[in-house]
Image: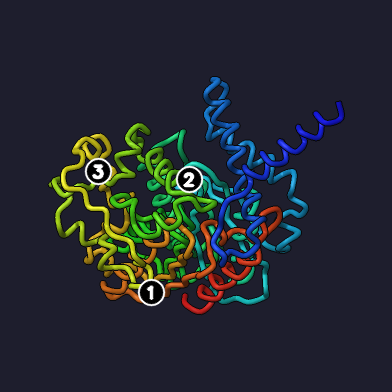
């Protein structure tokens, strides 16, 4: 009789270990911590999917609630404890909810920097009001003596593209108005736009629009993009294939995020994974347009490795007909023309070696440079997606502190 409990215990242990363990590159530091965090997120996602299937609640809303509960349970310190003195206000900019962080008063009368920040989360998850994003923005405000505006843009499933982009653009224009800059004592020559992952996508798109808008008297002097997601035409770049099973963002999950954001039928996912939507016979994608995201020409040699481009001759016309936003530059900033990129502000682009989005960022670095923009590419050889905001419990990593420090140092010296 005593054998049965032992067998059950062994089987459960093996099952849990199998669920947690994910092969990781040798360069990844603290691998078991990353595996545990990824396993936790997968468990939350599986449970949310089951609840959705049973008709209880949309799985995205369920994931949000689980993450919020997890952060509240583990949060040993509040943002006020971590960065004392930063003033926090929840207001609206042009009807869009934002959280404003003002640095501690230092007795100086000179104007301060301004930063508008768009959080990541696949246009579906994330908030600035708790957890690591709140702490990151407090630290940025304090260390840069900057007024930081973090935008609570609307997300899937409540809204689809282009609503998140339009929310961010409206908030950015409001922030850049002379009246608002004067109210917060911000130097109009020192205002940056920034964001990570899906937020990096929004930051790049907003930077392009603001840069080409002749009605804007104040424009951004810098853009800081953290592993931005920038294109939908090729999901078989070297980084998508090399890192397709990496935590925290797999190839399948990134394509799912895209489809949700753009309101696409998830049944089309295999078409996108096979690049059938960007086949050569598709006349909507001109040769000039293809050149704007041709990784064989845009990537440094060391990142091409031995991968070959996946070029489809016929493919499917259906996908672009049903999801025209796949070619909308507001969603895919890498498709912007050189005349648009040439007007963009100087850029800091952080890329991570073990990230499906690595090549999106690297191609944008090259295209901005070719357009004459000053660009700093901070490539993290042992980096993975999500590491930038991993600077506070319960998701604190040594690499998070290092990557965040590099970002702050660039911002300190470049705008």
3D distance between C-alphas at marks 3 and 1: 33 Å
Label disc, if present, on residue 184 of the rendered structure? none
The quadrant of the image that shows the N terminus is top right
Q: Judge depth for marks 2 and 3 and give the one in front.
A: 3
* Measured Cα–Cα span from mark 2 to mark 1: 27 Å
Could you tell me residue 44's position as x and y percent? 61, 37
Q: Is residue 311 above or below residue 9?
A: below
Where residue 406 appears, x then y in whole percent? Answer: 55, 73
Within-10-Å neighbours for mark 3: few <14, some 14–19, many 20+: many
Horizontal side, residue 282 vs residue 392: left or right: left
Count the numbered circles shown. 3
**Based on the displayed image, in which of its 4 quarters is residue 364 positioned?**
bottom left
Most foreground residue, 154 or 357: 357
**First in residue order: circle 3 vs circle 1:** 3
Dot 2 alpha-carbon crowd within 10 angstroms: few under 14, some 14 to 19, many 20 or more: many
**Secondary structure category for the residue under label 1:** strand
Mark with earlier residue (2, 3): 2
Q: Give the residue pinned by disc 3.
A: 276
The mark found on residue 375 in the picture is 1
Residue at image location 49% in from the left, 41% down from the top: 124
Q: Which residue is mark 2?
A: 153
Instruction: Tell which of 150 and 307 is nearer to you.
Output: 307
Q: Quadrant of residue 361?
A: bottom left
Residue 369: horizontal and vertical position, in percent? 31, 74
Of residue 277 and residue 203, the one placed in the foreground of this image is 277
Which residue sits at x=38%, y=46%? 166
């Amino acid at each position: 009789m005593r054998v049965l409990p032992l067998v059950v215990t062994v089987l459960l242990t093996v099952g849990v270990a199998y669920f947690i363990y994910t092969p990781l590159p040798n360069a990844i530091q603290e691998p078991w911590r990353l595996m545990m965090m990824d396993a936790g997120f997968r468990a939350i996602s599986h449970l949310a999917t089951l609840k959705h299937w049973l008709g209880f609640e949309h799985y995205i809303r369920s994931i949000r609630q689980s993450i919020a509960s997890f952060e509240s349970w583990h949060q040993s310190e509040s943002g006020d404890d971590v960065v004392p003195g930063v003033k926090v206000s929840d207001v609206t900019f042009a009807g869009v909810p934002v959280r404003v962080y003002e640095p501690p008063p230092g007795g100086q009368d000179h104007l301060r920097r301004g930063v508008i920040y768009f959080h990541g989360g696949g246009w579906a998850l994330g908030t600035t009001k708790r957890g690591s994003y709140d702490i990151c923005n407090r630290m940025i405000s304090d260390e840069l003596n900057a007024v930081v505006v973090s935008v609570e843009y609307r997300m899937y499933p409540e809204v689809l593209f282009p609503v998140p982009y339009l929310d961010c653009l409206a908030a950015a224009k409001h922030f850049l108005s002379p009246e608002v800059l004067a109210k917060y004592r911000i130097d109009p020559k020192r205002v940056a736009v920034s964001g990570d992952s899906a937020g990096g996508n929004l930051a790049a798109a907003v930077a392009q629009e603001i840069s080409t808008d002749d009605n804007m008297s104040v424009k951004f002097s810098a853009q800081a993009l953290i592993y931005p997601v920038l294109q939908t035409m090729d999901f078989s770049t070297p980084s998508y294939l090399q890192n397709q099973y990496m935590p925290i963002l797999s190839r399948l999950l990134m394509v799912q995020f895209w489809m949700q954001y753009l309101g696409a039928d998830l049944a089309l996912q295999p078409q996108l994974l096979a690049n059938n939507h960007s086949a050569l016979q598709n006349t909507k994608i001109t040769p000039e347009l293809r050149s704007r995201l041709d990784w064989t020409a845009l990537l440094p040699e060391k990142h091409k490795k031995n991968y070959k481009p996946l070029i489809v001759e016929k493919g499917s016309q259906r996908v672009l007909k049903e999801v025209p936003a796949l070619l909308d530059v507001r969603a895919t900033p890498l498709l912007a023309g050189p005349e648009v990129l040439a007007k963009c502000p100087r850029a800091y682009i952080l890329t991570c070696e073990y990230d499906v989005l690595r090549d999106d960022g690297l191609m944008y670095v090259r295209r901005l440079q070719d357009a004459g923009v000053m660009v700093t590419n901070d490539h993290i050889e042992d980096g993975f997606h999500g590491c930038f905001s991993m600077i506070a419990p319960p998701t604190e990593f040594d690499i998070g502190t290092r990557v965040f420090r590099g970002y702050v140092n660039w911002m300190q010296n470049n705008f």
